[in-house]
Amino acid sequence: MNVVDAIAHTMKAEGVDILFAYPVNPLIEAAAKLDIRTVIVRQERIGLHMADAYSRLSSGDKIGVFCMQHGPGAENAFGGVAQAYSESVPLLVIPAGYPRRLAHYYPNFNSTMNMQHITKWAEPITMGKAVPEIMRRAFFQLRNGRPGPVMIEVPLDVMNEEVPDNWQYVPSFSAKTAPAPSDLEAAAKVLAQAQNPVIYAGQGVHYAKAWNELKALAEAWNIPVTTSIEGKSAFPENHPLSLGSGGRANPRPVKQFLQEADVILGIGVSFALTAFGVGMPKGKTIIHATLDPMDLNKDVPAQHGLIGDAKLTLEALSQAMENHSKAPAAARTQVPERIAQIRTEWMSEWLPKLTNNEAPINPYRVVAELDRLVDKDKVVITHDAGSPRDQTTPFWQATSPLSYIGWGKTTQLGYGLGLAMGAKLAEPDKLCINVWGDAAIGFTGMDFETAVRENIPILSILFNNFSMAIEIPIMQVSTEKYRSTDISGNYADMARAFGGYGERITDPNDIIAALQRGIAATENGQPALLEFITDKEITISNE
């Protein structure tokens, strides 16, 4: 067995059933021979984004894998790997590499050297007999500890080398850790005695599948819950204790309750400070529960640290809190009512935008109608960078785990299309939606053709205001002469040209019917792109 065949057999043993790829890489044919589906994209970044969503939607049980050619293919893939690294997504990246005699020769692109700072683990295969141990290391890194991309570079002159004949690959396993009992006791006492605690839940809750444990703790102790964008849908947002999701834009209850909190429990979060996350107010007692000790006291000072898997942590914390009086929790019986009151006041202020019936269409109206129309238990939704993110996150009510793919650190335009396609492959029976703008489609729109060719019937909601509107307040210099934010295009026509369903909507009265037609197209197996001609809305919810 040669190297690429051995890698394919390893993938098969690890349960990999799809290989996302861009030619040329001999691994594509090796995988196809083992009935691993190959999905060929139009550019490398989209393939990585598809693998990204595939891993997230399976909570790491199945690993998304992407391969590409050496040199320019690896160079083009850099951004997608960096995105997965910033969002802590476990995916396997397998670039071809220059022959060993050229691998370190300027100006050849050496993936191992250049990607080691944006991967959890990066290693070249320098000889055939090393394949068994390298693949073992790769999958154990993918299934253990803080999630992140792992890269294995395969030089061209190594691909046909033989591996040991007697090699039998043993699939990897996942080992969990839990916080120290003394740390749990200290944190339990603080949280149980808190007067106004808030739980801030992140993506680690998804990876640990700790949704029930999070809900049980919140309900038992009457603690309101908010989430990061990555953690959105970890707690049902129609629950009386839900504050909503906090990002650059957020519902009013999020910031108000965080400001009033005396204790904040961060579970499954890094507490990284970014321009796209809700900031933690100062002067609070912070209990930081995370899988990675590198997160502790990095950006947000914490008084208590709990290191371990989110599910094990929540189980143990709940048990430890049973030793304490529930009098403070009983005193918070009015919390759900207060959350509802604040949310109602906030929503009433936004109602003019959410119900706007003027043309050009207000994007908030489209989000509101979509939120009301679909079956939330049968949907996975994501968004793109900039305005679509800020317009979707506060007003989309996520009610089922992993029904929303969020992100909020590195923000590459065009990310949402690949995420939606990867989600549809992971959840073929669900309606998978991406919300993006006319700036984002300019980056990755050609891969709508991939959705058509590969029979991936997603629903693309495009806001076209013929402008990069979020940049307008920044670019006010000489606006009559220097229109740096102006762009144009007819993207419904593009979708039809690719063989998909495309429709341009200009009348607000057509929004609901158009959404229904787009959804029907996906149910008939056809990718759909609904192009809403919108105004240059730049207001966001960030009180």
Image (spheres, rainbow, N blue to C red):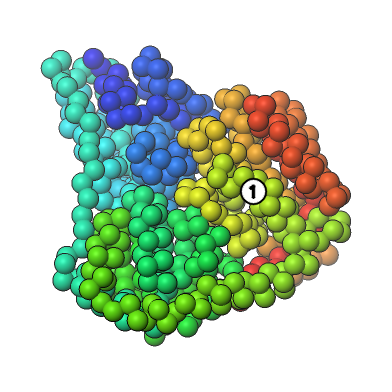
Q: Is residue 308 left or right of residue 117?
A: left
Q: Residue at x 74, y 62 (%)?
A: 354
Q: Give the residue drawn at x 65%, y 39%.
A: 459
Q: From this viewpoint, is residue 72 visible?
A: no
Q: Nearer the viewer, residue 425 or 68?
A: 425
- Identity of the residue furthest to the left in this view: 166
- The image shows residue 507, relative to residue 172, as above or below, that is below
Query: Does residue 151 sit above or below 401 in this rendering?
Result: above
Q: Locate residue 94, reporting x and y percent.
A: 36, 33
From this view, report whether residue 262 is shown above or below residue 383: below
Q: Assign a secondary structure to mark 1.
A: strand
Q: Which residue is under mark 1?
A: 435
- Quadrant of the rendered structure where residue 535 is? bottom right
The front one of 448 and 58 is 58
Badge 1: few (under 14), some or many (20 or more) residues near its Cα, within 10 Å?
A: many
Residue 471: percent from left, percent from top: 68, 63
**Residue at image x 56%, y 77%?**
338
The type of residue carrying mark 1 is Val
Q: Position of residue 450 (x, y in %)?
A: 59, 29
Residue nearest the viewer, comparing 248 with 149: 248
**In the rendering, at what x and y percent does residue 19 appear?**
42, 28
Badge count: 1
Residue 463 can be seen, yes or no:
yes
The quadrant where residue 8 appears: top left
Left or right of 428, for residue 533? right
